[in-house]
Amino acid sequence: MLAITLGERLLDGYIKELGIYCHCCNTVVSPSQFEGHAGRATRRKPYHNIYMSNGVSLHELSISLSKGRKTSDRQSDDLCSICSDGGELLLCDTCPRAFHRECVGLSSVPRGTWSCRYCESRQQRERSVAYNSNAIAAGRIDGVDSIEQIFTRSIRIATTPQTAFGGCALCKLHEFGKKKFSAKTVLICDQCGREYHVGCLKEHSMADLTALPKGAWYCAADCVKICEALKDLVSQGAEAVPAVDGDLIKKKREEKGLKEDGDLDVRWRVSRDKSSEDSKLVLSKAVAIFHESFDPIIQSTTGRDLIPAMVYGRSVRDQDYTGMYCAVLTVGKTVVSAGLFRVMGIEAAELPLVATSRDNQGLGYFQALFACIERVLASLGVKHFVLPAADEAVSIWTQRFGFAKITQDELLEHLKGGRTTVFHGTSTLHKLVPGTSASE
């Protein structure tokens, strides 16, 4: 039995299939939807507020499960969680985070097991039953090791089912040659991410290859143009937002009673890697905003936090985020809003993560950032814009930004062989990019 609690028991359910069977609607929903059904969608912390019948939170359970994994099975971060640089790192024995000793104030490597301050504070907070009203409401008894009770039961791990996404963009088949270069060898476009059999490229008069190309490879002239345009956008750095967006922000701030002594310096920029100290700082602030706004996005096979990999555009085992770009909105020197987007050729672009820092919500910042991203897509000739949305956020995207729900078949048609970022328990939303049409 599961219950969502915020100082009191609000809603009951139990684990079923890939989600939670909610007693209020008698259907299987995701943890975030379960939180929303309890009237607490704005909290966005389902794993911290959903408890087992013995008072153990889902977050506490997931961390405890990861403790038993061997290092080879649980991949640690390869960048410091504080400064986002590599080098000689100290690994937390409780979570995948890694740190420079200097960044956590240690003069030497600690002996035995070591947990970072994030895990230490969480463990202290969750173990102190007397001060944990949620655990008390869920039924935890002081002095009883609830985690040990859980480990006496069998635990099943569900895998993500195979879908029709991916495969050769031309023949739609998923087979490929693993050894020598042949007609079944698969090439992946470095811009749109679509897969192509060498033989299919030749049949469709797209390319006649006798060996793997050296360096980057693009499936079409449009992908080359998009790649070059995005590189130019990154090199331009921060630019002032258009007047129409600046006026919206000014109006929102006035409605909140915020007055400026002078002109508000609102700018936006696109970053992709840490090639400069400036870009490195901007991306690290984007990571902080996403961590503040969302529960960790964890890779099931390794327990690794995927948010830094997404922001920095890296590949992590079977997850490839090398095509991601990070757009941010700044007010003065403060990053207030961030969004990740990926352009899959002229057919489609996706927006998998967007967030505004808590202290700056409701001031029109993300609306301005979204408008800037959308203008870029229009200038690139991109036709479709898609994103994953939790149920509680669907109405915002449909009513304010013009998106609508689509089926998997419709999504497959729009992507033309491309793959989007998929989060369990979300709906896929779609809109045509203004200034383009599906028939173009």
Image: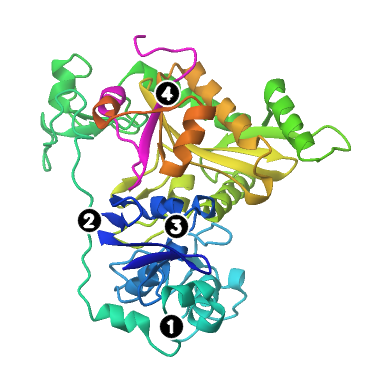
Residue bearing mark 4: 431
Magenta part mainly helix, strand or loop?
A: loop
Above/below status of 332 relative to 12: above
Amino acid under disc 1: Thr
Q: Is mark 4 on a helix, strand or loop?
A: strand
The quarter holding residue 201 reads top left
How busy is the neighbourhood of tag 1: few (under 14 within 10 Å), some, or many (20 plus)? few
Q: What element carries label 3?
A: loop
At a point 31% along the width and 83% down the height, the residue shown is 148
Earlier in the chain: of badge 3 and badge 4, it is 3
- Mark sitting on residue 17: 2
How busy is the neighbourhood of tag 3: few (under 14 within 10 Å), some, or many (20 plus)? some
Picture coordinates of residue 241, whole percent (x, y): 68, 27
Disc 1 to disc 3, C-alpha distance = 23 Å
Residue bearing mark 1: 113
Disc 2 to disc 3, C-alpha distance = 21 Å
Q: Which of marks 2 and 1 is in front?
A: 2
Disc 1 to disc 4, C-alpha distance = 50 Å
Disc 2 to disc 4, C-alpha distance = 31 Å
At a point 53% along the width and 39% down the height, the residue shown is 339
Residue 403 part of the magenta-drawn span = no
Residue bearing mark 3: 296
Extreme front residue here? 24
